[in-house]
Image (tube, helix red, strand yellow):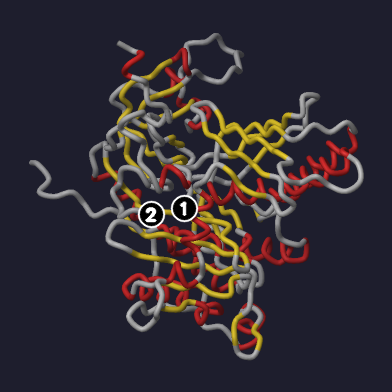
């Protein structure tokens, strides 16, 4: 018989009974205060409207990160979601499969992201041939597969998938049906040693675990609770997969603000300010039950009582408008021009009004160092991904080119998005890549012009007859 209704999608756990913590544990993880006020390098401001939720991260008063999250449509913002997909077609020549996951565009699964058991594969090759099986040996059209989205669909491209599924908690990442485990390299050796002993105790049978940076100073009881939450979630997903027919959404990641707080919130944040009562209650419940030492850092911004909207109060709107312009001024009078093309993003560095004081080489070096710092911030703020080519002002000395490259790499180190930077070439060009995970700032806050299709040119009718 037919199913009367689709089973409920598994949702991420955003509330749990709090683990009891002693005063010493709480005090060590609360973060700094001054005169009773929380202090920290960062501030998160969340503005909710009917059309979207906007999240701004400030360092001091400066906007460094901005995200737009529209109400869950299960179409565009699906990063981290888990699906039972149906293979539509397999392209051996591209080592790719297209998979129907229920979104308008089929998702893409590359050969390197396919999981398989070597004992179950017949590749038709002679014995002793150890070559990896081809994608057509592993997948066939109409086959149902469990998969997870690693990249949102962008423009004409469908979402990117992997069969290497993982579930992120606050302190650990669960890797189902795996034997491996790891600990974040960002943690000091003494803490890694402590966490390794906890990990060996709490590691669930049949699953792998990765300890996150957020596990620093966290008690064994909290980590154990995080693991059991994730195992429970995975069991629910597995059961749902067995009773569903592809294509079907099995697991949905939480809303963007909760996801960002799960990934980012630590004692370096002086606060999370939310101007919507419902979302504030949800976030406050999550933080007070799972990240208790930071519970008092979540605040509600009452727009009825306050004179200014949240984003105006913290000068976010003003900074956003500047971040959408192609030209960025540098402190000493130079500038960056940032332009997008289909293939890559191009950045031109100019000295502009920066005329320096001593020699041309020193002026150019100082200007390029300023540009390196500002460009690292702009890439993160504008969320520019893909290939990026930077045309620095020409420097004669190789040592100066190396100094600018080092400065740029150091400035990018605070950006959690993966980057790869090559040395400056003889033409003064630097090539780099930054992982693209979704639409950038410009795309999330604008539409393409219907008259010129985004080219910025209007053909002269009188000359085109």
Left or right position of 187 against 54: right
First-in-chain label (1 vs 2): 2
The answer to whether one can see residue 16 in this image is no
Asked where in the image residue 192 lies, by quadrant, the reply is: bottom right
Given the current orientation, which residue lies at the most extreme front position? Answer: 462
Which is more toward the observer, 449 or 17? Answer: 449
Residue 443 to residue 389: above or below: below
Q: Which residue is mark 1?
A: 167
Count of marks, rendered view:
2
Give how far across and how far down residue 457 sits, in percent: 41, 27
> Is 69 displayed left or right of 180 in the figure?
left
- Using the image, determine if residue 27 lies above or below residue 182: below
Residue 29 placement (x, y as % from top left): 63, 77
Q: Which residue lies under the disc numbered 2? A: 69
Instruction: Check the picture and name the quadrant holding the N terminus.
Output: top left
Q: Secondary structure at mark 1?
A: strand
- The quadrant of the picture occupied by the C terminus is top left
Q: Tell me what residue is drawn at x 35 percent, y 43 percent.
A: 76
Residue sitting at 64 percent across and 69 percent down?
Answer: 41
- Residue 85 in view in this figure: yes
Question: On the picture, is 71 further left or further right than 214?
Answer: left
Q: Give the percent coordinates (x, y) of residue 455.
A: 42, 28
Q: Residues within 10 Å of mark 1 (few under 14, many from 20)?
A: many
Bin the neighbour count of mark 2 within 10 Å (Cα to Cα): few under 14, some 14-19, many 20 and up.
Answer: some
Q: CA distance from mark 1 to mark 2?
A: 21 Å
State the residue at coordinates (74%, 41%).
351
Most foreground residue, 334 or 72: 334
388 vs 89, nearest the viewer? 388
Q: Nearer the viewer, residue 276 or 264?
A: 276
Residue at horizontal 45 percent and vertical 76 percent from the top: 289
User: Considering the numbered disc 2 on the image, is that residue within a helix, a strand or a loop?
Assistant: strand
């Amino acid at each position: 018989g037919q199913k009367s209704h689709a089973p409920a999608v598994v949702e991420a756990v955003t509330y749990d009974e709090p683990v009891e913590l002693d005063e010493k544990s709480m005090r060590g993880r609360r973060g700094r205060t001054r005169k009773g006020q929380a202090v920290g390098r960062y501030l998160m401001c969340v503005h909710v409207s009917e059309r979207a939720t906007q999240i701004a991260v400030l360092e001091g008063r400066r906007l460094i990160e901005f995200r737009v999250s529209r109400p869950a449509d299960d179409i565009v913002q699906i990063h981290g979601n888990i699906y039972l997909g149906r293979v539509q077609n397999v392209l051996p020549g591209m080592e790719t499969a297209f998979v129907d996951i229920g979104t308008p565009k089929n998702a893409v699964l590359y050969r390197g992201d396919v999981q398989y058991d070597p004992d179950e594969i017949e590749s038709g090759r002679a014995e002793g041939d150890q070559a990896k099986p081809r994608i057509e040996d592993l997948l066939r059209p109409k086959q149902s597969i469990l998969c997870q989205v690693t990249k949102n669909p962008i423009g004409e491209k469908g979402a990117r998938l992997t069969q290497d599924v993982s579930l992120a908690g606050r302190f650990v990442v669960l890797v189902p049906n795996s034997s491996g485990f790891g600990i974040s390299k960002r943690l000091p050796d003494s803490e890694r040693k402590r966490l390794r002993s906890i990990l060996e105790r709490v590691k669930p049978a049949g699953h792998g675990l990765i300890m996150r940076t957020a596990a620093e100073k966290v008690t064994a009881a909290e980590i154990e609770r995080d693991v059991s939450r994730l195992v429970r979630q995975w069991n629910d997903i597995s059961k749902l997969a067995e009773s569903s027919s592809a294509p079907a959404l099995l697991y949905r990641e939480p809303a963007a603000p909760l996801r960002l707080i799960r990934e980012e919130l630590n004692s370096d944040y002086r606060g999370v300010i939310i101007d919507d009562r419902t979302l504030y209650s949800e976030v406050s419940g999550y933080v007070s039950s799972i990240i208790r030492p930071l519970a008092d850092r979540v605040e509600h911004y009452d727009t009825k009582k306050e004179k200014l909207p949240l984003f105006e109060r913290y000068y976010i709107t003003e900074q956003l408008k500047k971040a959408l312009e192609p030209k960025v001024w540098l402190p000493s009078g130079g500038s960056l021009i940032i332009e997008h093309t289909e293939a890559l993003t191009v950045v031109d560095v100019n000295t502009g009004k920066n005329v320096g004081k001593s020699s041309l080489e020193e002026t150019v070096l100082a200007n390029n160092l300023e540009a390196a710092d500002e460009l690292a911030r702009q890439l993160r703020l504008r969320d520019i991904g893909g290939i990026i080519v930077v045309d620095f002002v020409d420097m004669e000395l190789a040592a100066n080119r190396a100094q600018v490259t080092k400065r740029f790499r150091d400035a990018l180190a605070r950006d959690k998005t993966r980057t790869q930077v090559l040395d400056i070439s003889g033409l003064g060009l630097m090539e780099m890549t930054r992982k693209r995970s979704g639409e950038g700032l410009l795309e999330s806050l604008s539409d393409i012009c219907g008259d010129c299709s985004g080219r910025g040119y209007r053909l002269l009718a009188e000359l085109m007859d």
